[in-house]
Amino acid sequence: MEQGYNELLDRAWGSLPDNLKEHSRFEIPKADTFIEGNQTTIRNFNEIANALGRDPKYLMTYLFKELAAPGVYDGNRVVIQRVLKQGVIEQKINAYALEYVICHECQRPDTEIAELAGQKIIKCQACGAWKPMRRIK
């Protein structure tokens, strides 16, 4: 009986995708910011968006709304028309990750934005769970 269980367990483990077998820690790069006049620039914005697995425009829209400041996307960097501390920016990026990247069921970052019946959803590649994507207001 125990032999059969181990065989089933091995077969189940073998059928899992490779990214689920790894337990690497999900880390968001620290925002590389500098203040010039009344503007704050995030120099590694694309790197942050790539680590989150999201289009930089989604993250940019979220940040501009949450920080209540206009800004400009300029290649690899974002210039925000307001003086902001690095900690405030990182706090907003972490809040974005919790809402739009991390799975609400298994807490893994293996999600993607998909569409279901005309509505955008956040679907987890690891466990299959999904939830409606909250609009950025």
Image (cartoon, rainbow, N blue to C red):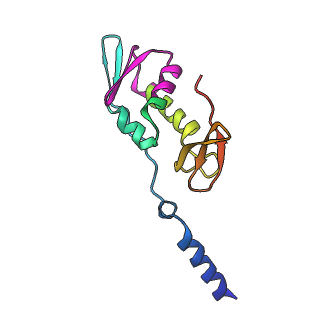
Provide residue 54's location: percent of width, then percent of height: 46, 39
Q: Quadrant of residue 84?
A: top left
**Does residue 111 belong to the magenta stretch?**
no
Residue bounds of the magenta highlight: 60-88
Residue 83 colored magenta? yes
Q: Quarter of the image containing the C terminus?
A: top right
71 over 54 or under it: above or below: above
Residue positioned 49% across, 25% down in the render = 61
Q: Residue at x 70, y 88 (%)?
A: 1
Of residues 83 and 137, which is closer to you in this image? 137
> Relative to 116, is 79 on the left or the right?
left
**Residue at the spot 61% in from the left edge and 77% down from the top edge:** 9
- Residue 124 in percent (x, y) is at 58, 50
In this view of the protein, which residue sits in the foreground, 92 or 127?
A: 127
Most distant residue in the front direction: 118
Q: Is residue 117 left or right of residue 110?
A: right
Q: Where is residue 87 shown, x and y percent of the image? A: 43, 28
Q: Is residue 52 above or below residue 21?
A: above
Quarter where residue 133 is shown: top right
Query: x and y percent of residue 69 in the render?
Result: 46, 15
Furthest residue in direction top, as rendered: 38
Q: How many marks?
A: 0
